[in-house]
Amino acid sequence: MEQRVDIVIVGARVAGASLAILLGQMGKRVLLIDKASFPSDTLSTHHLSHVHYLEKLGVREEVESTGLRKINRMRTYVGDSFVEGPRDFYTIIPKRSHLDDVLLTKACSNEGVELLESCTVKDLITDEQRVIGVEAVDKTGETKRIHASLVVGADGRHSFIAENVQAGKYGFHSPQRPVFYGYYHGIEPLTEPTTEIFLNEGRIGFLFPMEPGIDCLGLEVHSEEFKEMVKNSHKFKEIYQSFYGMEKRLQRASLQGKIVGTPGVPNFFREPAGEGWALIGDAAHSKDPSTGLGINDAFMQSFLLAEAIQKHDEGRSWDHVMAEFKQKRDEQLEPGYRLTLDYIQSMRPWSRDEKALFQAMAANPMVWNKIVPHLPDLLKEHSSSLPELYGSVEWEAKNFGFGRNENTFIE
Ligand SMILES: Cc1cc2nc3c(=O)[nH]c(=O)nc-3n(C[C@H](O)[C@H](O)[C@H](O)COP(=O)(O)OP(=O)(O)OC[C@H]3O[C@@H](n4cnc5c(N)ncnc54)[C@H](O)[C@@H]3O)c2cc1C
């Protein structure tokens, strides 16, 4: 079968489906192809902090309609102590089967957008150096040849499109840490929905409240622990029970389904465009999930690519709009990339003295009375090689009133 569209998008999850929504709204004829069928899950937890992207894509209400809790607080544990505070905007934890399906339904509600599911792209169609389409095989074994002005690889970090166009990689760091997660019913909740992060023994635990009564528990462990975690299904819960308060909170909880995981996620950028092709989402940029940014980043790249395509339609050269796309993409992704790499590379067990002193300080209000005014300077000084850490704190603090004139509201 032969078909012609404006744009083929390979991969129909957060990157591909969000781009299809935007291109559909621009009046493009778009074919989304995915080897998966939908709704379906993929290996990913669901921390989604930039909810404004859902609003801009017109799907926020639908994504939240399953009763997702709006999480306004974050708590970080160090040993048996913790610090907790509000976030400037709420986070949600939608299951990927739901999120991806809502995005796809929205995309396909556009007349010009069509989805081919259970269909695997096996080859590129080229004309000399230029990509001009794809060849795909559906579940009946039929081969489809689809011609398009642009082929977008939104096909994940092992991207077939990227491999075949030989998109160059840069900023590469090998996978550092295995990640596991599972869904639990009945964990004793905190009074307010709160993302909980446990920094313990060089591991990172994350508790994501989803809907009432259901939480996603995740765990990043040391690379040498991977095999044992896979062999021993109780290890995950055992480690969780060692986190402060969790033995009791897990007493009435039950695991739904299985614990799943990966030995690690590679960290890299890929060249995002060439003649007749472009890459978005994990295909273009992949990183360790400990900072929970992959879904936001996929949306951000879709918006940038749609903007670039619009400019090209208005007459700007492809090379020019793609150079600008790459520059804006890297500017926006690099701070989060550096923060993520630093986070996972500097993670280690606390020494006994560090932990003991932190615990003693955490419980002492006189210490906090003395130290709060100096915390920003301490952070700046101790992260001088990572200025984006202080920058991100200051940026969020502005939403809590930082930098506003203290006397504004005083009569
Ligand atoms: C363990 C783990 C936890 C994570 N937790 C979070 C989190 O809490 N928050 C967050 O923001 N991010 C998280 N991430 C990252 C997040 O999952 C990714 O950034 C995100 O899924 C990228 O979306 P994507 O659409 O680019 O690719 P994907 O979600 O990987 O989708 C790619 C699609 O392409 C299809 N495909 C691939 N090859 C072909 C082909 N040849 N033909 C047809 N179809 C093809 C696949 O079937 C798939 O559906 C996590 C990742 C992992 C591994």
Image (tube, helix red, strand yellow):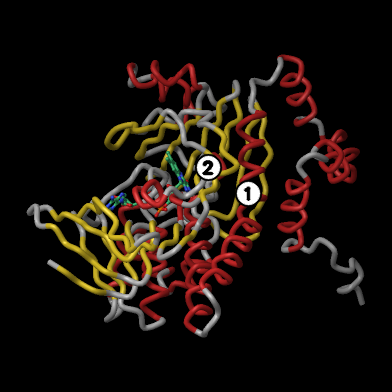
Which quadrant holds residue 129? bottom left
Name the residue located 42 percent from the left edge and 28 percent from the top edge: 263
Residue 320 x %, y %: 58, 71
Asked whether, in this view, residue 368 is left or right of residue 155, the answer is right
Name the residue located 89 percent from the left edge and 66 percent from the top edge: 406
The reply to whether discs 2 and 1 touch (Cβ–Cβ < 8 Å) is yes
Tell me the distance, in whole angstroms, between the alpha carbons under discs 2 and 1. Answer: 9 Å
Label 2 or label 1, whichever comes before in sequence order: 2
Nearer-the-camera pick, 80 or 140: 140
Residue type at mark 2: give it.
Lys
Residue type at mark 1: give it.
Gly
Asked whether, in this view, residue 212 is left or right of residue 77, the answer is left
Q: Up-down: is 60 above or below 389?
A: below
| Residue identified by numbered label 2 | 287
Query: Which residue occupies the extreme front position in the image?
Result: 128
Query: Which residue occupies the extreme left position in the image?
Result: 140
Name the residue located 60 percent from the left edge and 25 percent from the top edge: 200
Q: Up-down: is 200 above or below 405?
A: above
Residue 131 x %, y %: 36, 62
| Secondary structure type for disc 2 | loop
Q: Up-down: is 100 above or below 286?
A: below
Nearer-the-camera pick, 80 or 21: 21
Residue 358 x %, y %: 76, 26
Mark 2 closeness class: few <14, some 14–19, many ≥20 residues within 10 Å = many
Residue 197 x %, y %: 57, 37
| Secondary structure type for disc 1 | helix
Label annotation for residue 336: 1
Q: Up-down: is 201 above or below 28?
A: above
Q: Tell me the quarter of the image containing the N terminus.
A: bottom left
Q: Tell me the quarter of the image containing the C terminus.
A: bottom right
Asked whether, in this view, residue 378 is left or right of residue 252, the answer is right
Mark 1 closeness class: few <14, some 14–19, many ≥20 residues within 10 Å = some
